[in-house]
Structure formats: C-alpha cells, structure tokens
Image: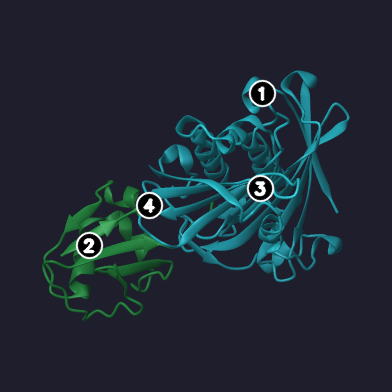
Amino acid sequence: MTFRFTGLLLRFVGYQRTTEITATNLADALRQLRERFPQLRPVLWDESGSLIRVHRLLLNGELLSKPDDDVPLRDTDQIEVLTAIAGG
Amino acid sequence: MRQVEFTQPVTTTQFSPLQLRPRTLLSLMSESFARWTAAHLVPFPALVAEHGTAVVVQSVGIDYAAPDLRFDESAWITVRCTMSADLTGDRLWMWVDYLATGRLAAKGTLIVRVVRLADKGSLAARPGPLPGHLLAMFAPGEIRELDARQPARDAESWPSVGNPALTSSWSTVLCRSHCEVADQWSFIEMVELVTHARERLFTMDVSESARVAVAAPLRSLRAVFRRPMFLFDECQVDTTVCTAVNGDRPVVHHEVRGAGRDAVHLSVWEQLDPLDT
C-alpha cells in the first residue's frame, strides 16, 4: 500500500510525496511508517501511541473516522495523511 | 481599550500608482497583532512555545479612505490598533487605523480564531479558546460579544455582488512564498494572490470589465478564510467581475478551491471605485 503526504507533513518525511509499504492491516502499516520516518512520531502520535486527532487518514479518498488497527489493506490501497489546521 | 501605535517610513514597494497596496496594509496588520500581544499579553513566540496557543486568520477587512494616500504624500505611516476577545476567548478581533499626513488613510479589521497546538514541531492544531490566564489579561472593556460573520455579511450586501459580467479561472500551486512558518497559507499572501488573479484579467480580456479590474483603486476588501490550504496544494482561483448596479461600485469576487474540489477555502470580495471614463 502507499502512504501519501501533503502540506506541513512533507518536511517530516524528507519531502517524499509517497512511500510504499507492504502491510496487510492498518496497525502494521502505521508501525512501519513510524520506523521509516522517526521524525513523524511526535507529530502524528501522542505519548500513549494514539494518533493525534488533528491529523486525518483517508483510505482511498474516504475518511477513516475511527482508524482501527485491524482495518485490512491491499497492495493497491492508498492512505493520505491530512492536517486540518496549523497555528501560525 | 488599550492601544498600540507605531510609525514606519514609507517605501515605494508599499504602494501601487493608485494607493497603498492591500499587501502593505495586511502586513502592517500582522505586525500590529504581534505588537499588541507583546505589549498586553505575551510575545507571539512565547504564546506558541510556552502557552501552546496560536491563531489562524478567519477574516480580514480593509476600507480605504478617499482620497487615496499616494506614495509622495508622506514620509511616514502611523498604525494604531486595539484588540478585543470574545466572551469565550475563542476569537480575537483587532481594529487598525492607518494614518499619514494627519489624516486617516485606511481602516482594517482582523478576526482570528484561537487554536491550541497539538505539537510544537509541526504546529498542527485544533480550535480551542485562549487559556484562562491569558484571557484574564484583557481589560474588562476588551472582552465582549463579537459577530464573526460580520465581514462576510458586509461584502454580501454590496449591491453589485450577483451581477457578473466577466469570469475567469486560474490554477496555481501554493509555494513557500505563499505560506507562513507552519507551511500553511499566509493570509497576506493569499489576498495578494487574488489581487494577482484580478489583474491577470487585463491580459486575457479586452472588455470594459477587465479595464475596471486594473484601472480603478480599491475602496474596500473583505476576505473570509474558511479552511486552510498548505504548501504545494494545487488551488483554483475563480474570479468574477460584477459590474456596478444603480451607481454603486463594481465588485470583484474570488473563490479559492482545491484543484478539482467543490469546497471553497477562501472567499474574497474587492469593491472598486467606478471608472470616470
């Protein structure tokens, strides 16, 4: 599956718009994402390991309102990580 | 209400041949906000770093005084501002007067939404009120009921709105020059972007409406920032020139959307003076 990044998150993934990951569910995909981009950890996850709710995950364009760990993923799936708002 | 005042030298880049550029006024508005918070709350960097709080612009308004101030009329421009918070501390409202040669050159208003930072690295945030100890630093007369919808209502009441004569669409990509420190759009640069869209009309169309769009000075501007856009987002600027109705002023209306999306992220209305000839 593919993660896609935009906006303010780009600088935390070395300005890679997309990154490919082999995973069968969301929990595994997110774990691999954390390992690949350690700078993303304090941005996307809180200290308890939960996704911070200012960021949203879109699976193939559909908002994952409750991004459960066991959401199944296929090779062709795309997850876009969006940020609603930033202070500035 | 407590005031902050500062004076700056005038430079050529602050002006068009017609008047002070909107960008100049908005830039001074941003500086006014930083100066007021530094004087009466905390400096902006401390607001972010120590209080986990920031703001996003919800709307801005500019009203130019006639006759328009020209570059060679004054060596200095003085800016005076006051600020209020709404009752819950969710929004701050600033009023700005721009003065030169002993008279008012323009007035500005700025409404910002207070946000609380989720992390200080990315500055990602969610709406949330000013912390209580900061709201308590406002003087009693500076906390009051505020109507955040007022700027949009102002513009929607302009008679020429809804009488379209010329439309145009322009797509572009937001770059760092359009953004602020969090790689989110800057309100100053986004208003600059739509003035760019208006002036492009002159190169694309030979009608009277296109001539109006560049020849007449701005009289008023209202911008409503509905949802932010970020670095490298593709955006589409849809511009409509609305011709004057019943002797009122023409209006240029812009809507900024994500490319191929329906949702409007930014609405701007520019009210222009009518052309004499």
Give the quadrant of residue A44: bottom left
The span from disc 1 to disc 3 (Cα, nearest Å) is 35 Å
Tell which chain the image draws in cyan: B
Residue corresponding to mark 3: B43
The reply to whether the C-beta atoms of the residues labelled 1 and 4 are less than 8 Å apart is no
Q: Are marks 3 and 2 on the same chain?
A: no
Residue B274 seen from this side:
yes
Depth check: B46 or B23 in front? B23
The reply to whether the C-beta atoms of the residues labelled 3 and 2 are less than 8 Å apart is no
Residue A7: give its label: 4
Q: Residues within 10 Å of mark 3 (few under 14, many from 20)?
A: some
User: Foreground mark, 1 or 2?
Assistant: 1
Q: Chain A: what color?
A: green
Residue type, numbered disc 2: Leu
Q: Quadrant of the N terminus of chain B?
A: bottom right
Depth check: B185 or B43 in front? B185
Q: Residues within 10 Å of mark 2 (few under 14, many from 20)?
A: some
The span from disc 2 to disc 4 (Cα, nearest Å) is 17 Å
Label 1's element?
Answer: loop
Residue type, numbered disc 3: Pro
Label 3 resides on the chain identified as B
User: Foreground mark, 4 or 3?
Assistant: 4
Residue type, numbered disc 1: Pro
Q: Is residue B148 above or below residue B68?
A: below
Residue B38: percent from left, percent from top: 70, 46
Q: Is residue B169 above or below residue B24?
A: below
Label 2's element?
Answer: helix
